[in-house]
Image: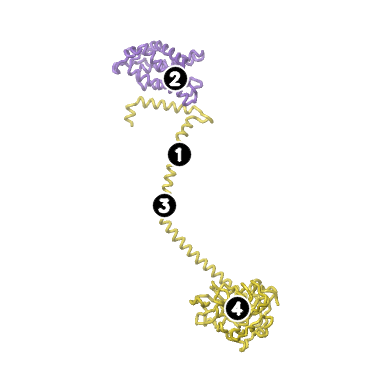
Amino acid sequence: MASMLNTGLQSEQNIEVHKFYSGSVVLVSFVALILQAFLHKYGRWADVVDLPLLIVIYFGVSRRNPVTGLLLGAAIGIFQDGLSHDNPIGLYGIAKTLVGYLASTIGAHIDTDHPVARFVLTFAFFHFHQCILAFTERALLNQSAPYFSLHLLVDSLISAAVAVFLFAALDRLRKSS
Amino acid sequence: MIGALSRHRPLALLAAVVLAQVLLLAYQIRRSHDVRLIRYWSVEASTPAAQGGTWFFSRLGGLWSGYIGLRNARTENDQLRAEVAQLELQNRELETQANEAHRLEVLLNFREVHSEAQMLAAQVIEASADPASETLVINRGEQDRVKRNMAVITPDGVVGKVVEVFHGTSQVMLMTDKNMGVGAMFADTRTHGVIKGTGDPQPVMDYVVNDEKVAVGQTIVTSGEDKIFPKGLLVGVVASAKDGNPFQKIVVRPAARLDRLEDVIVLLTQEELAPGKPGTPYTVSPVPPPPPAPAAAQIKSTTTGDVIPGRANPAKTENPAAPQSSAGVKTEHPVGTQATPVVKPDQPGGPAR
């Protein structure tokens, strides 16, 4: 896996900044949020994959712009908080803002188009996102959210796997250079 | 600062966005007692600053009030000290005036009570330079019709007599002077004797036989036998009495405060004073003026050199029994030539006899 990451690692000058069709970012983000909320009512299995998180990661590493990445993460996170009936506004927003910033920053340095790289990045960002969430809940909400668990590990693996296919599908929204 | 922000614009923006959301979260979250977290944070964040500010400003205020504000304290202190000194001086002047007014009021009352008697108010202006001489100088003299041997009293009692008269002043010999003698008697028993100065603050009453019962506190008044002091003037009270040879040794506490005389009264007449108001020591009934004493009875006292009318000097005559108690020797005194004093029943000196 390390060799795959290394092969994908390129110099910053050689990394391509992908552009998407107009409105596609907003549309995809909105659909992901609606779908996440829609599927939530059908059972616990819908919570395994955090679709807004995957969208933030994808557009962050693709646009490779920290500003747009963090703003997109903030917007999606706050929207997700708004759709949650018991989450205070900002809980997911903070976590996804940091994920968006970090993803775009990392995407500016390495090639993230490889499926393995996408799997690893998604897995890592999942846990990073969870750590930020847990920290925020512990610090602000005074709740005992876990930083890591076996259940979270499974979820992260599933999310990473879904992300490989989802990202490949989203690649079709890119403008051809 | 701005350059650093522009160089790290994404990071600054990240911090701003995260901070905004944290604040947003804090605004929504409620802690115990239904207090919003942002308010809790605000209070927690501002409390140290407020405490520090309070401490700082209290120190600053203390510095101001303790040091800087005291720049003019010395000047102000000096001014206040001067003001206090001036007020103290003014206060003393007022006290002096009040005391003087009180004394004059007493004299005036005395004068009003005894309006029939000719008297003259005088001020003590000088005391004797001789420690052995109990004399003082008053501001009344020949021009004020003051003459030698005039009685000097206060509303409290006998003071002394005029011994020298000058144009504007007179010298008064106190009853405590060792050359002074005053004809006196006990107000209740009417026993006669002579008040003799000893140079001490308390004179003695002589010529009272040992058989006579004398009690401490007994009132002594003038008998009028000396032809100087009208009859019935309060002299003092018995301070102590014990048997002696041949007469009792009776120490008298003068009624007048001889150590702090300021205003006195010079009696221009030897007539008895009219009775004063109840409670005053001069409640002797008015009596007709006594006739002049027989010349033969006027013997010059060896101790005073003054003439005590009607009183034989035992030292000169070597007749210690000459002054007797009123019970036995009244006829030997010129008292018999004088009007008999009538003491009213309410007289403080004792029952009427």
- Residue A170 appears in the figure: yes
The residue where tag 3 is placed is B70
Neighbour class for label 3 at 10 Å: few (<14), some, many (≥20)?
few
Q: Which is more foreground, mark 4 or mark 2?
A: 4
In this figure, which residue is indicated by the disc labeled 2? A130
Q: Which residue is mark 1?
A: B51
> Where is B316 relative to A20, above or below?
below
Label 1 element class? helix
- For the N terminus of chain B, the quadrant is top left
Q: Which residue is mark 4?
A: B195
Q: At which x and y percent is residue A163? A: 41, 13
- Chain represented in yellow: B
**Amino acid carrying mark 3 in the image:** Leu
| Residue type at the position of mark 2 | Gln
SS label for mark 3:
helix
Pointers 1 and 4 in contact (CB under 8 A)?
no
Same chain assignment for discs 2 and 1: no
Dot 2: element: helix
State the CA–CA distance, disc 3 to disc 1.
27 Å
The numbered disc on residue B291 is none
Amino acid marked by disc 4: Ile
Check disc 4 and report its element: helix, strand or loop. Answer: strand
Disc 1 with disc 4 on a shared chain: yes
- Check disc 1: other Cα within 10 Å, few if <14, some if 14-19, many if 20+: few
Q: Chain of mark 2?
A: A
Question: Residue at 44% of width from left, 19% of height from top?
Answer: A130
The earlier-in-sequence mark between 1 and 4 is 1
